[in-house]
Amino acid sequence: MADFETHQYDVVVVGAGGAGLRAAIEASAEGARTALVCKSLLGKAHTVMAEGGIAAAMGNVYPEDNWKVHFRDTMRGGKMMNDWRMAQIHAQEAPERVHELERWGALFDRTDDGRILQRDFGGHRYARLAHVGDRTGLEMIRTLQNNAVHRGIDVFMECTITRLLTSEAGISGAFGYWRESGRFVAFSAPAVVLATGGIGKAFKVTSNSWEYTGDGHFLALTVGADLIDMEFVQFHPTGMVWPPSVRGILVTEGVRGDGGVLRNSLGDRFMFEYIPEMFRTETAETEEEADRWYTDKKNARRTPDLLPRDEVARAINSEVKAGRGSPHGGVFLDISSRRDADYIRRRLPSMYHQFKELADIDITTAPMEVGPTCHYMMGGVRVDPETQQSTVPGLFAAGEVAGGMHGANRLGGNSLSDLVVFGMLAGRHAAEHSTASGSPAPVPEEVLDGHAEEALAPFNEHGEENPYSIQNDLQECMSSLVGIIRTESEMLEALDRLKVFKERLARVHVEGHRQYNPGWHLALDLRSLLTVSECIARAALERQESRGAQTRDDFPTTDDQWGKRRVVIRQQDGEVVVSQEPLSEMPEELRQLVEEEG
Amino acid sequence: MSEAVTLRIWRGDAEGGEFREYQTSTSEGEVILDVIHRIQAEQANDLAVRWNCKAGKCGSCSAEVDGKPCLLCMTRMDLFETDETITVAPLKAFPVSRDLVTDVSLNYELAKKVPPFNPVPPEPDGTYRMQQIDIERVQEFHKCIECFLCQNVCHVIRDHDDNKKHFAGPRLFIRVASLDMHPLDATDRKDLLADELGLGMCNITKCCTEVCPENIRITDNAIIPLKERVVSRRYDPVVWLGRKLRSRT
Ligand SMILES: Cc1cc2nc3c(=O)[nH]c(=O)nc-3n(C[C@H](O)[C@H](O)[C@H](O)COP(=O)(O)OP(=O)(O)OC[C@H]3O[C@@H](n4cnc5c(N)ncnc54)[C@H](O)[C@@H]3O)c2cc1C
Ligand code: SF4
Ligand code: SF4
Ligand code: FES
């Protein structure tokens, strides 16, 4: 028998970003013995990097704003692919969750009358994002972290889950290893909440960290849960492009929200040329109108610089292809000529710092160079909108790893709110589930031994493949063949190459021993990364239309029939299987909200 | 455009270790973390180093470069002459786990000792009113990314292992200050500061402030005001009583 420690909990939360922390807080408030497991140190999850803000229709800046407008914006931004019920719950609950963060000590920037200030962001009709300068995620994660540590939640940091455990009744726990010692851990629990975030490391240019290898997607798939919308990968329009070492690092949409504009090498504000039909009535036609909109939302329409991200990313891509790009293959993002230096430094301190330190650029005097970067996974584990339970009993998912909420394209700011709204629901229902189902049947020792053996394979085999080169080749492949613009022949080629990567992974070899060995960690993460890459390519191939984040060169328009269908992915006999299902019908009163003109 | 560089990186674990030399290349605009990642990918797959954001936002990648504590992801290669060997070592004040990774769990344990945020009741509509000017100081403290560089340079911790038990260190003082100066908080943490967290042991050398990558003025804005509050609270019975009564209501 392999040597491992065992623990018993009511609820195990995998992931300690905003979603995982909120879930753990709720589960423990419901009386569940709760474990919180994460790959990095506590407080270092992606949520800490979020910049621009958290969307909630509090109406502090524009009293006209309310959940209905927020719901409408979210559905239209998602090209109507969203699970309408999730979008509704999200829009209704977000304000209360933001106020709750304040009750827990978060200090958002203020309006003149002392309430929470809200800023403009792409696709949101009104200034809606509560924020703290451009470090909102830090405020949020620290608030949740400080709250969580006083609730008796047991935190397992730098501990990676590699397998979920199941019995006939559903989930029975999780299996993983401590990164520091390399020793194995088995958790027994009737409810597991996945809050593992996204998949950005499948692509070469990304705003995401080493942690984003799609572990939660993979874990869910392997125990029989459905994944949905996997074709929808968000490329954020503004990542840094120069110098090469920072390529992909995010430049917050807040720059445009606070007055920055995009220009090509001719100095033109090219976004006016790329206004799609769907947003024409709510988008400014002239620069004069667009500039007026920042202060007068009643009589002017939104600047096209703040169209939803999919539109802006495609536009930048086209400008660069047409030869109107910046020297390093991006476009210019200019706030220096439009706002004074003090304002820029106050509103965007971390952008100022980031460009100054990493690119030798003073954004108060010079434009930034920006281009698309892989940023967010809309697709994920299919969940019940009311409970966040997946199609496997006892398995819950919340945050970026869950699918449905954002449809074909996420609006900026809607992730942080998603985390707390659905993190809370997941925690509550996981706790209820565990009370109702009691302790799970013990997992047979052979099964645990099998998981341990599998995890150790990279040491034992006489392989010769370097995990870093597999990852590198995978990223090249996904970026060039399944990136922003897709076409059938290229995706088929990607699928062929993915097979080869899988074979190579079977021959991977890592040096050294089990103690804090990043090569080994990567070799294990690559399993998830290759599997989610395959899911993305297959789903993208299946959807024969362009919609939201999915742009097909061979099917360049949206197709009404496809607008009613969802791509679902499951695993059967170890193979990834793709199918289509009809979207659920939206109630009439919600449909009317969405169809309202801007 | 790439240039050759030599790094001396500490390799080892709690039992001991040594510096090893690696030759590799670097190109325009790189930070030292890029070079370490190149070495990791090409020559030493098992080289342990922490990182997440690569943009100075998460505080994971703290280490000592040529003896100077810094964030590896914000330390540019063009700070160094190409012909000099750059030495990279783990943080000195914390026990080594492996290579550049140290055991910083003590900081998380200490954080549990600080009584949580305890807000006054909200306005009738269930929300709070606060003026921007009244929260700016605490917002400065909230910028802390928990890189623990300040803990690493503070001589009270760095030079005297025994002190760790009675001295919480600058990061924790920032945390307490952020609660103490929070306009909505109603708990008194001054006894804790003086008796358990060892605020008195700080002799205001300001090394912590100098190293903070978030430019938080740890000493001037947090530690000194906290010291003043502890003193006036302990020796001025009127202030003390006033605060006590307030925090009871
Ligand atoms: C630079 C940047 C800026 C952003 N800005 C904004 C913004 O302004 N507004 C907005 O709404 N959104 C923003 N986003 C998006 C948003 O931050 C993320 O989508 C969100 O934080 C994800 O939160 P999460 O809780 O789902 O996951 P994360 O915060 O990513 O946490 C994932 C957790 O899962 C753990 N984990 C993963 N796999 C495993 C495993 N196998 N075992 C154990 N633990 C595991 C990780 O260690 C981590 O703790 C931004 C994203 C980035 C990258
Ligand atoms: S000022 Fe105080 S806390 Fe800061 S380094 Fe000096 S002794 Fe330590
Ligand atoms: S106060 Fe500054 S140096 Fe200390 S942990 Fe926070 S960010 Fe790091
Ligand atoms: S990697 Fe986040 S601060 Fe360096």
Image (cartoon, coloured by chain):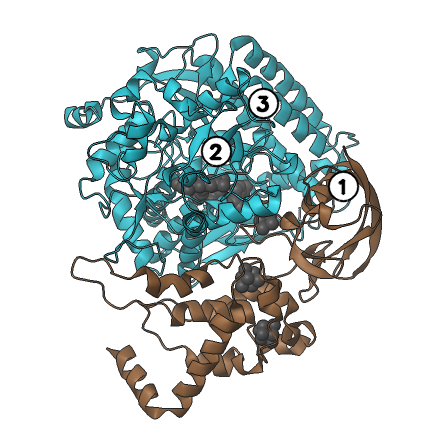
Frontmost residue, A185 versus A18: A18
Q: Give how far across and how far down residue A438 sits, in percent.
A: 37, 49
Identity, as a three-letter code, of the amino acid under mark 3: Met
Q: Which chain is brown?
A: B
Do circles 2 and 3 both sit on a common chain? Answer: yes
Chain given the colour cyan: A
| Quadrant in the picture for the C terminus of chain A | top left
Q: Hey, what amino acid is under mark 1?
A: Ile
Label 2, on which residue? A333
**Does residue A384 lie above or below A341 as drawn?**
above
Q: Is residue B78 left or right of residue A386?
A: right
Residue at disc 1, secondary structure: helix
User: Which residue is at a point 60% across and 47% down the rendered structure image?
Assistant: A357
Q: Which of the chains bears the disc numbered 3?
A: A
Q: Residues within 10 Å of mark 3 (few under 14, many from 20)?
A: many
The reply to whether dot 2 and dot 3 touch (C-beta < 8 Å) is no
Which residue is disc 1 drawn over? Answer: B39
User: Which chain hosts label 2?
Assistant: A
Label annotation for residue A573: none
Secondary element type, mark 3: helix
- Residue occupying the point 61% across, 47% down: B51
* Residue A93 visible at all: yes
- The residue at which mark 3 appears reads as A478
Q: Quadrant of residue A114?
A: bottom left
Type of amino acid at the residue the image marks with label 2: Leu
Q: Is residue A506 left or right of residue A561?
A: right
Question: What secondary structure is found at the residue carrying circle 2?
Answer: strand
User: Does residue A196 appear in this view?
Assistant: no
- Kindly identify which chain the residue marked by label 1 belongs to: B
x, y (%) of residue A28?
37, 56
Kindly report which numbered mark, 2 or 3, lies closer to the viewer in this rendering. Answer: 2
